[in-house]
Image (spheres, helix red, strand yellow):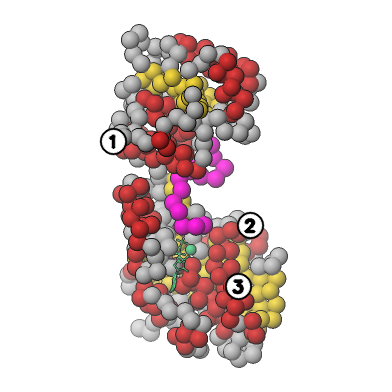
Amino acid sequence: MTRPATELRLDKAQVFADLNYEPHEGQRVVHESRALRRVLACGVRWGKTRCAAMEGIAAALEPRATSIGWIVAPTYDLADRVYREIQAIIGMQLKHRLISMKEHDRRILLRNLAGGVSEIRAKSADNPVSLLGEGLDWLIVDEAARLRAHIWENHLAQRLIDRRGWALLISTPRGKGWYFDSFRRGQGKDTSYESWNAPSWQNPHLDRELIEAERARLPERVFMQEFGGQFIEGSGAVFRNVRECATGSWQQPNRGDSYYAGLDLAKVEDYTVLVIMNRRGEVCFVDRFHRLDWNLQIVRIKAALQRFDSPRLHVDSTGSGEPIYEALMREDIYATAYPFTAKSKTALVDHLSLLLERREIVLPRSELWPEGIDELEAFEYSVTEHGHVRSSAPSGQHDDCVMALGLAALLAKPPEGAGATLMPLRY
Ligand SMILES: Nc1ncnc2c1ncn2[C@@H]1O[C@H](COP(=O)(O)OP(=O)(O)OP(=O)(O)O)[C@@H](O)[C@H]1O
Ligand SMILES: [Mg+2]
């Protein structure tokens, strides 16, 4: 059987050498592959973007009358990563070939090695209308595992048919959708697909210390997905055992028990959530309210706290929370401020994740607290532009139940040997 393959019209290795790009071992095999669909599912900072950018450059230099290639990602910011890298290389080393570079359209026209015109465009999948149009010679998809299946099937894959274009799908592994299926095809007998799977540390340019620091910080399965580059079921989720821990009921205050409370105050769009938990880590009471007048909120919070014998309360005091925090203090509520920063939120989430992993928390059953259970299950890990792993609610979803629960849990079940970063910062 002949292997469906891309045609070779230029000496890629020579082009890379001329551009002072030395692919590492893992990148080299990707560049050498001639499969029409290449799927690169590797750990964070492996060098996927660099590898893809160099493929884009090589494609645009191929001697042809014309060629068109797209870089697509779930958002413009993500598509920009490969695009900006291509732009920088052209700006530094291929300026003499540049015909035009339109910032607004994310569009570059380049004179290729045959004197023909090659077009490179960056597109965002969150605007499918912009994905209508021409047949493509090549396509790079960044963060492909986050791209919805219908975008790949209906808008992208078919763009490649007319001109027998190739696609390079790069991503950290995530979930088991169309991207995982494509990866699997690349491991099987379908010769038009080839796929690779490698950990971050295959990149010799990567700082080992950064990787080890993340290994120590992250739950094992998350580390193995993000840095190990492995497809792991449910591993994007931050909190494990949520359902297993959701076996409790609301509880009346019990004389002699100690209680702890966490309060996340509504910002512009979200809810104020109060969580009260006992010393065994059982969530006893939750109140959640939206757009109530601040004075009413204080009355309601105070009443709930009084019922539970005025427990200690952790409250996020940042931004619009500040005046409420002050007002709570005036009401003689035993509140400690836990100002939210990226770092303090991470500490809170990591701690909560550990408690759930160890099943040291009992949540109300999902029918009693559906929004809380949903929020916990939806909370996910993602990788920032700078390669750091961040945990948050998926964009557009709330995190107030998680934060209030995390604040209460810090008091009820404080981290062992907690240092200054986890302790309340102000009384
Ligand atoms: N062949 C190479 N030679 C020199 N440096 C490289 C090479 N490949 C990658 N790097 C460097 O390694 C770092 C990570 O590369 P890159 O951003 O391409 O990784 P990535 O897998 O796309 O990361 P992320 O998961 O964050 O998107 C960058 O600083 C990049 O410059
Ligand atoms: Mg990248």
Mark 3 or mark 1: which comes first in sequence?
Answer: 3
The secondary element bearing badge 1 is classed as loop
- Range shown magenta: 385-398
Type of amino acid at the residue the image marks with label 3: Gln
Mark 2 or mark 3: which comes first in sequence?
Answer: 3
Labels 2 & 1 near each other (Cβ < 8 A): no
Q: Is residue 292 above or below residue 125?
A: above
Q: Residues within 10 Å of mark 2 (few under 14, many from 20)?
A: few
Horizontal arrangement in the rendering, residue 375 relative to residue 268 (left or right) = left
Q: Is residue 123 above or below residue 32?
A: above
Residue at (50, 76) in percent of width and height? 54
Of labels 2 and 1, the one closer to you: 1
Q: Residues within 10 Å of mark 3 (few under 14, many from 20)?
A: many
Type of amino acid at the residue the image marks with label 2: Asn
Residue at (61, 67) in percent of width and height? 122
Q: Give the residue at mark 1.
A: 358
Q: Residues within 10 Å of mark 1 (few under 14, many from 20)?
A: few
Q: Which mark is residue 87?
A: 3
Residue at (35, 48) in percent of width and height? 218
Of labels 2 and 3, the one closer to you: 3
State yes or no: residue 297 in magenta.
Answer: no
- Identify the image quadrant of the N terminus: bottom left
3D distance between C-alphas at marks 2 and 3? 22 Å
Q: Can residue 183 be spotted in the picture?
A: no
State yes or no: residue 393 in magenta.
Answer: yes
Residue at (38, 84) in percent of width and height? 2
Tell me the quarter of the picture where residue 420 sits. Answer: top left
Q: Residue furthest left?
A: 358
The secondary element bearing badge 2 is classed as loop
Q: Give the residue at mark 2.
A: 127
Magenta part, dominant SS:
loop
Q: Can residue 219 be spotted in the picture?
A: yes
